[in-house]
Image (cartoon, rainbow, N blue to C red):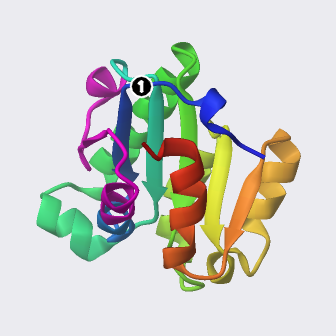
């Protein structure tokens, strides 16, 4: 399992792919009273200032459009943050709250996030092909399977609760 001993402040929540998952994660963290910074479009330079990063992985062309970011720019940003996390020994939690309709673009962002992950939280439906559980097994890291998005409250409370 993954415990609060494995995270340190400051904590950043950001998105790889600009899906609505990042806003849901923000709401869940507020619910557990966690202290963190929310910046869906944080740069790698921003990320370097944090000890723990929670990445909401999953692409939304609507979300990218609303943020005024091209797919290419978002991929470059995600790659840079993943590298920054590795280079600076930043703890990375990957949260995939989306359902089964992932798609190639979404998986591209998830792959970048999973490449630097220390812990994974995934809604079961989004892991119907075993993508996230296989990544956890391959990397030897813990994973929490959630039945619904709301079920993320418990592990987030255990890790980040006041």
Question: x and y percent of residue 114 in the render?
Answer: 63, 47
Decide if residue 122 is on the left or right side of residue 65.
right
Q: Which is nearer the eye, 89 or 11? A: 11
Decide if residue 1 is on the left or right side of residue 75.
right
Decide if residue 97 is on the left or right side of residue 46.
right
For the point 49% across and 76% down, the residue is: 150
Query: Is residue 36 highlighted in magenta?
Result: yes
Figure check: 4 above or below 158: above
Question: x and y percent of residue 52 in the render?
Answer: 47, 31
Figure check: 142 above or below 129: above
Figure check: 5 above or below 41: above
Count of marks, rendered view: 1
Looking at the image, which residue sits at the far front? 162
Decide if residue 52 is on the left or right side of residue 112.
left
Looking at the image, which residue sits at the far top? 88
For the point 39% across and 47% down, the residue is: 75
Q: Quadrant of the C terminus?
A: top left
Over which residues does the magenta segment extend?
Answer: 25-47
Crowding at mark 1 (Cα within 10 Å: few <14, some 14-19, many 20+): few
Q: Which is nearer the eye, 109 or 72? A: 109
Query: Is residue 100 highlighted in magenta?
Result: no
Question: x and y percent of residue 103 in the render?
Answer: 54, 77
Q: Which residue is mark 1?
A: 9
Question: x and y percent of residue 41 in the render?
Answer: 24, 45
- For label 1, the SS is loop
For the point 46% across and 65% down, the residue is: 58
């Amino acid at each position: 399992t993954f415990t609060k001993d494995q995270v340190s402040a400051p904590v950043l929540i950001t998105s790889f792919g600009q899906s609505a998952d990042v806003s849901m994660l923000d709401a869940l963290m507020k619910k557990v009273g966690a202290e963190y910074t929310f910046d869906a479009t944080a740069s790698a330079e921003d990320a370097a200032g944090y000890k723990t990063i929670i990445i909401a992985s999953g692409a939304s062309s609507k979300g990218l459009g609303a943020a005024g970011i091209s797919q290419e720019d978002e991929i470059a940003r995600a790659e840079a943050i993943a590298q920054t996390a590795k280079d600076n020994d930043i703890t990375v939690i990957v949260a995939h709250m989306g359902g089964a309709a992932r798609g190639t673009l979404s998986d591209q962002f998830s792959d970048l996030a999973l490449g630097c992950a220390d812990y994974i939280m995934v809604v079961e439906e989004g892991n119907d092909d075993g993508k996230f559980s296989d990544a956890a097994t391959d990397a030897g890291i813990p994973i929490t399977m959630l039945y619904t998005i709301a079920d993320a409250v418990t592990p987030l409370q255990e890790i980040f609760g006041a």
